[in-house]
Image: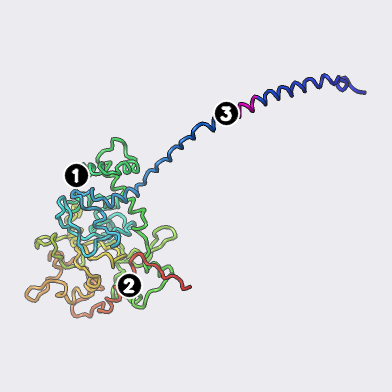
Amino acid sequence: MPTKETAMPARHILLPAMLLCLLAGCGGGAGGAAADASADAAAQRPPRTPLPAPVPVPTLAQVGDRLFEEVSLSASGKLACASCHVEARGHSDATGSFLPLGGADGTHQGLRSSPSARYLDQAGAFGFDAQGRPRGGLFWDGRANNRSEQARGPLFNADEMANADVAALATRLRALPYSADLRAAANLPAAATDNQWVDAAVTALARYQADDARFHPFTSKFDAVQDGRTTFTAQEQRGLNLFNDPQRGNCASCHDSRPVQIQPGLNRALFTNFSYHALGVPRNQSQATANPAFFDLGLCARSDLAGRADLCGMFRTPTLRNVALTGPYFHNARFAALEDAVAFYATRDLDPARWYPTVNGQALVYNDLPALYHGNVQQGAPFRRAGQPPALTAQDVTDVVAFLRTLSDGFTTAPAAQ
């Protein structure tokens, strides 16, 4: 039997439904008209101008790249880091030059040649090993412990960029057209001090050299051979054998040819152990050393090593990577030709008249070092005593030089034949 609910008259059900339909119709009609009007208004409004993309803050390395080329950081307005560390020359001296003239008036001759700025990240701070031997550091005398300290030195050297003091350099930094980039990259405060500006600049220079692959490319033929991508010629292989032979060239005893870890997954030879030696290199009669009473004593000329007579005449062993590009050679730029630099090792004490001036038929050996310190001069292979045969013949020298030329960056293997 139907309940009361099922027996409800039909009109009681239809009336609410009709009301709902009417309400829906009213609401829908009004909403549609409003939406159309809103769309028309939006179509008539001009398009919004998009907000400009945020300008990226340059990195310290990017600013350092610009500072490296910046001549206005020098007192003369003519000298930049790149003036003495030329990329095409392995970031070393320009072709055929000792050092560009520097100083406040651009007439000063520097004392030492510019060592390559490449492959320095593994040098470490200067110090003495367990046997008391000096190692590490940057510059020929190791006085800088890292790239930031190294970058600071030439900026204030009276013979180089010759800034009188921190305030003078900070003034030049603030005047740079991209000083805002340096401020942003280094996060300098609005009221940055002179010291903060200079610290930011040398940090940027250091970061640039540490980050930019051009300062540690490892793209020589030697590297390609180690990777199995090419092979040495017979002459280059003979040169390498002589280079490593402890009784012949003995070059690897200081210019280590064994690979070390550069970073995880990358092992490469640095061709230096960052040690120090007195080699008895002949004097270079340049403007800087024309005074016969002056001697560049290397390590013992440092104020913190004064009195260490056993260190006099010692200079840091440079890397031989790019050595075919980085002449002139040795700390005093005495030799222009790589062949002469290698031959000097072979015949220094066998044919001294070839290398040193003579007086009354007597060669003035080790003439760039006072006689008091001649006992510091390196002996042993490849140096031989008078009467002994040379450790390297003329042909050996040629072969070693052929090998050394494989250490230049930029080697590319020939494309495979089609």
Packing grade of label 2 (10 A; few <14, some 14-19, many >=20) is: many
For mark 1, give the secondary structure.
Answer: loop
Front: mark 1 or 3: 3
Reply above or below: 232 against 146.
below
Q: How many marks?
A: 3
Q: Nearer the viewer, residue 179 or 262?
A: 179
Going by the picture, which residue comes out furthest to the right? 1
The x, y position of residue 378, in whole percent, is 22, 68
The x, y position of residue 318, in whole percent, is: 27, 63
Outermost residue toward the left in this view: 360
Q: Estimate the x, y position of residue 313 in percent, counting from the top left.
A: 18, 62
Q: What element carries label 3?
A: helix
Q: Say which amino acid is labelled 3.
A: Ser
Q: Name the residue under label 3.
A: 38
> Is residue 33 part of the magenta span, yes or no?
yes
In the picture, the disc for residue 234 is none
The one of 371 and 92 positioned closer to us in this rendering = 92
Height in image: 322 above or below 171?
A: below
Q: What stretch is highlighted in magenta?
A: 30-38
In the picture of the structure, the residue carrying the numbered disc 1 is 165
Q: Are marks 1 and 2 in contact (CB under 8 Å)?
A: no
On the rendered image, what quadrant is the N terminus found in? top right
Which residue is the site of mark 2?
403
Mark 3 near mark 2, Cβ–Cβ under 8 Å? no
Q: How far apart are marks 1 and 2 (CA)?
A: 45 Å
Q: Is residue 132 visible?
A: no
Q: In the picture, residue 118 is in which quadrant?
A: bottom left
Observer-nearest residue: 418 or 59?
Answer: 418
